[in-house]
Amino acid sequence: MIQLIALDLDGTTLTGDNVISERNRNALLEAMAQGVLVVPATGRTFEKMPSCIRELPGIQYAICSNGAAVYDVRADRNIYENLMPYETVAEMLRFGDEYKCFPEVYLKGRSYCRLSQLDLVMEYPRLSDYAAHVKSTRLPVESLRRFVLDAGCGVEKVNLWPKRREDFPVMWGQLLENQAVSITSSGFGNIEINAHGCDKGDGLLHLCEYLTISRENVMAAGDNLNDGPMLRFAGESVAMGNAIDDVKNIAKYIAKTNLEDGVAEMVEKTGSEKEIDKREGTSALSFAIIRRSRKAGQPGRAKAFLLQEKNERKHTPGFTGQSFGLCRKRLSAAVG
């Protein structure tokens, strides 16, 4: 039984331009009305989540900054933090300066940038696509290192935007060798840096421990690299139809794209026993096999078939089961 649904935002729950479709919104509201916890899981801070998500009635918890902060909305406090110390942050900022990056620092639920670079956003590939958003949401400071030092607390995330596209793989390779940090990307040409071992999966793990929810009762959905760890943790993992291949390869199921209300489709399937069973990776044919194999005392043959069908569903986008005639043949072969 699904008790918690963890959802990435960009490319998953949102259709674009920080908008949630009416169908997605209604599906989430209905799930929460049924007692399911819906938890946004994002690389953003809670404050910078779109209002359509942040103000959605029933949202009680949020996994923010790629798992660096697990936020209790009602109590207005973090129930878990995994932060970087000043020394690591200063090192990452110096590293970014070597490649002339646009750096951002996420601290105490807010995101900061250098005042001197704020008007230079258009010079950075990909970041220029979000120039208006960056200028309206980032808080400018004279010196990021000095600001972090004076703050006297750990940092949730450092976000580096390379100025030259060709620097991205070089930087990525070097950061992979740094044992003090974990790196990921939300697919926008940026490198997101967190404390070692920090990711959405770690944040989801600690939230589930706090709520005493088993991972088998958790569903997670996402589309990009930073979603991978939480999909690996969740008992039921869903990749969006628009997800990158690395995410599709680790997910149990593939939904429709974010522009086709894939989240609503997934959530709605948890609303009835029949559809929940389908979520387990099985079709109507599979359930016929289960029933008949149990009566025949041959559960092993059904299990082998179910594993075969689950593999087909995982690796075949849009898999919807077999034709009626073929279903009958496979049913007969499976249970005799």
Image (cartoon, helix red, strand yellow):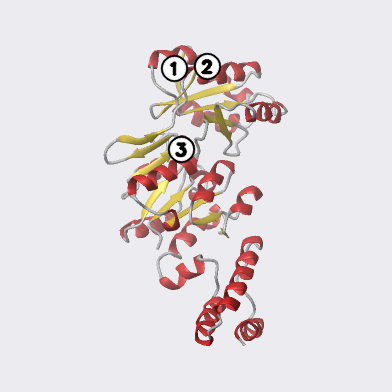
Q: Residues within 10 Å of mark 1 (few under 14, many from 20)?
A: many
**Residue 129 at x, y percent in the picture:** 59, 33
Which mark, residue 90? 2
Q: CA distance from mark 2 to mark 3?
A: 21 Å
* Residue appearing at x 29%, y 35% in the figure: 76
Disc on the earlier residue, 1 or 2: 2
Return the residue nearer the eye: 246 or 120. Answer: 246
Q: Tell me the quarter of the picture where residue 26 sits.
A: bottom left
Q: Position of residue 130 (x, y in %)?
A: 55, 32
Figure disc tally: 3
Which residue is denoted by mark 3 in the rendering? 67
The numbered disc on residue 315 is: none
- As shown in the figure, which amino acid type bears the numbered disc 2? Ala
The answer to whether mark 1 and mark 2 are in CB contact below 8 A is yes
Q: Is residue 100 visible?
A: yes
Residue 35 in the image: x percent, y percent? 32, 58
Q: Is 222 rendered above or below residue 114?
A: below
Q: Give the secondary structure at mark 1.
A: helix
Looking at the picture, does residue 60 appear above or below residue 252?
Answer: above
Residue beneath label 1, please? Answer: 148
Tell me which amino acid carries mark 1: Val
Secondary structure beneath dot 3 equals helix
